[in-house]
Amino acid sequence: MKHEETQSVRKRRALEAFLVSGARSGDAAATEKLVRLLQPRLLSHAHRLLDDADGARDVTQAAWIDILRGLPRLRDASAFHVYALRIVSRKVARVIRGKQRDRHLANDWAVTCVTEEPSLGERDADASAVRAAMARLKPAHSATLALFYLEGMTVSEVAASMDVPVGTVKTRLMHAREQLRHVLEVDNHDQTG
């Protein structure tokens, strides 16, 4: 990660910790700013996992209730983003389990297509190609890559936020990189060939 990106992540996390402290003390303005600051990242995470924009909005909205209720029990305000992402991941897992149950009962469930995520802020064709390739990966792989590379999280933070073991994150990163490389090579070959 570039030095400027690292600084940006540190500043964002410091701001989050400050706002968490304010929200804990009942400051409504701090709570509102915290929600506005983190909402796009939580929504993107839920969307990557669910592959459903409407479902991601519903999950994220429901997650905020648990996130804000649990603030007094959060020991380390600087770990807020991991805490919030973990709650979203658990809510998504419940939704997915429900959908799997419905699919087995009705046998008519279909996976929806990934829509573009404007929150990633990509500017050039290469970044757009990578985003499109990531959308074709398994949702768990795409989410793991996004948290690690785009959110600047450590492996242990990704593991905590996705509620999986560290080894699972490492394995997902390895497989996701391989799959991403393969997809990009095939796309590149198709365009030049």
Image (spheres, rainbow, N blue to C red):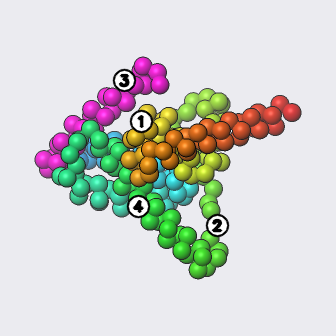
Q: Can you identify the residue that label 2 sits on? A: 110
* CA gap, disc 4 and disc 1: 22 Å
Within 10 Å of disc 1 (Cα), the crowding (few <14, some 14-19, many 20+) is few
User: Tag 1 or tag 2, which sits nearer the N-term?
Assistant: 2
Q: Position of residue 122 (x, y in %)?
A: 55, 33
Q: Position of residue 185 (x, y in %)?
A: 74, 34
What is the three-letter code of the residue carrying label 4?
A: Lys
Q: Position of residue 17 (x, y in %)?
A: 24, 38
Q: Position of residue 70 (x, y in %)?
A: 24, 55
**At numbered mark 2, what does the secondary structure look like: helix, strand or loop?**
loop
User: Tag 4 or tag 3, which sits nearer the N-term?
Assistant: 3
Q: Are marks 3 and 1 in contact (CB under 8 Å)?
A: no
Q: Can you identify the residue that label 4 sits on? A: 91
Magenta stretch containing residue 28, yes or no? Answer: yes
User: Tag 2 or tag 3, which sits nearer the N-term?
Assistant: 3
Q: Is residue 170 left or right of residue 191?
A: left
What is the three-letter code of the residue carrying label 1?
A: Thr
What is the three-letter code of the residue carrying label 3?
A: Gln
Magenta range: 1-29
- The disc at residue 7 is 3
**At numbered mark 3, what does the secondary structure look like: helix, strand or loop?**
helix
Q: Would residue 39 be seen by someone viewing this image from the given angle?
A: no
User: Tag 1 or tag 3, which sits nearer the N-term?
Assistant: 3
Q: Is residue 182 left or right of residue 21?
A: right
